[in-house]
């Protein structure tokens, strides 16, 4: 196995001291141009790459930001990551993206990894409804910002969307279209987003003079297309099938749409469907999907900026103050809900 090239090897090849090589790498303007060129040539010839981990240990400050999301298979979180990566790159940092797969145990493992790697900070969409993982991670003293989640019971920063308002937008649209019997295809009950969207749906029904019995909930264990297909099969088996369905995210809605297509049920004429997130695939579906849009890229960027602000507080003129940023959703109407009733 080939041995890695160290800074001493570069110094020997260039005929300079280790300190001079270090200055060329970290403070190039402090080294005479001829010496600098000789050192750079040796670096190029030997293929030297500096040890970033060693540099971080010396400086006590990482150039990596952690991002832990619920499901990287969901394009919504890909967009969150894009926004975070853009803001981090502008600050000269990289992002380590990890996927908890909606598992509290995997979330715990990744948070431990972030602590071991001494990351600058963490952007986190929690999977553990109990909050125990956050409590354990807090002991490491590493700053974190909650993404797509309000920081209830915590003092940390958070960036989220008003999911109660989003759920109300979806169901208000369906009620205005004439629907009086609806279903809510939800997800894991431990997720605040799922509960808040249901709360908004019930609020819209109440505004329309309809009771909670007008909304039948079809829970799912996951927030993916397969779970949506399963919910669609259950929906087809109902004796008194609702005329409209609101889904907790677009992947569920796409699964329901697939189930309806396979069964020969027309969308939107026989069943209107509204999703949530407005991922790219929503507009490209066989029946373009009405969806509640979340500004995912903006959410990721704002969360990263809050984290950077907190981690640089020691050099800032004013102390960092934790903030809760709540963004507003937007209803994007497409053909999947435009039935005449």
Image (cartoon, rainbow, N blue to C red):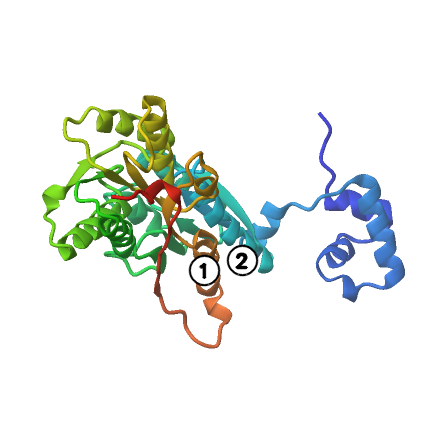
Q: Is disc 1 placed on a helix, strand or loop?
A: helix
Q: Name the spot of residue 50 as percent of width and height, x first.
A: 69, 46
Local packing at callout 1 (Cα closer than 10 Å; few below 14, some 14-19, many 20+) is many
Residue at the far front: name it.
340
Q: On the image, which quarter does residue 256 sit in? A: top left
Q: Residue at x 41, y 39 (%)?
A: 110
Q: Is residue 328 above or below residue 186?
A: below
Q: Quadrant of residue 48?
A: top right
**Dots 1 and 2: beta carbons under 8 Å?**
yes
Q: Note whether residue 35 is visible.
A: yes
Q: Quadrant of the C terminus?
A: top left
Labelled disc at residue 54: none
Residue located at (21% from left, 44% from top): 179
* Along the line of sight, the residue nearer the viewer: 80 or 278: 278
Crowdedness near tag 2: few (<14), some (14–19) or many (≥20) residues, C-alpha within 10 Å: many
Q: Which residue is mark 1?
A: 302
Q: Position of residue 150 (x, y in %)?
A: 30, 56
The residue that mark 2 highlights is 87
Q: Secondary structure at mark 2?
A: helix
Classify residue 271 as left or right of residue 82: left
Q: Nearer the viewer, residue 294 or 302?
A: 294
Query: The N terminus appears in which quarter of the rendering?
Result: top right
Q: Quadrant of residue 233?
A: top left
Q: Is residue 96 left or right of residue 126?
A: right
């Amino acid at each position: 196995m080939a041995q890695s090239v160290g800074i001493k090897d570069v110094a020997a090849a260039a005929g300079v001291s280790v300190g001079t090589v270090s200055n060329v790498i970290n403070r190039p303007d402090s080294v005479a141009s001829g010496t600098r060129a000789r050192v750079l040539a040796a670096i190029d010839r030997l293929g030297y790459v500096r040890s970033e981990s060693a540099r971080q240990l010396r400086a006590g400050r990482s150039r990596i930001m952690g991002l832990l999301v619920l499901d990287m298979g969901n394009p919504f979180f890909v967009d969150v990551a894009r926004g975070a990566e853009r803001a981090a790159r502008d600050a000269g940092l990289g992002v380590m993206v990890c996927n908890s797969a909606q598992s509290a145990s995997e979330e715990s493992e990744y948070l431990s990894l972030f602590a071991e790697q001494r990351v600058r900070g963490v952007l986190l969409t929690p999977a553990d409804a109990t909050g125990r993982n956050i409590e354990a991670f807090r002991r490491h003293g590493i700053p974190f910002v909650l993404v797509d989640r309000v920081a209830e019971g915590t003092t940390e920063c958070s960036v989220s969307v008003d999911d109660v308002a989003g759920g109300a937008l979806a169901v208000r649209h369906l009620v205005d279209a004439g629907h009086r019997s609806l279903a809510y295809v939800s997800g894991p009950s431990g997720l605040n987003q799922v509960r808040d969207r249901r709360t908004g749906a019930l609020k819209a029904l109440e505004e329309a003079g309809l009771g909670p019995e007008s909304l039948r909930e079809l829970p799912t264990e996951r927030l993916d297309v397969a779970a949506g297909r399963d919910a669609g099969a259950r929906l087809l088996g109902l004796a008194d099938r609702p005329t409209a369905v609101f889904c907790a995210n677009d992947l569920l809605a796409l699964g329901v749409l697939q189930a309806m297509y396979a069964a020969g049920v027309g969308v939107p004429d026989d069943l209107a469907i509204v999703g949530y997130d407005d991922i790219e695939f929503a507009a490209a579906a066989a029946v373009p999907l009405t969806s509640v849009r979340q500004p995912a890229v903006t959410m990721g960027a704002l969360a990263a900026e809050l984290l950077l602000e907190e981690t640089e507080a020691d050099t800032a003129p004013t102390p960092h103050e934790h903030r809760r940023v709540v963004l507003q959703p937007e209803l994007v109407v497409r053909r999947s809900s435009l039935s005449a009733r």
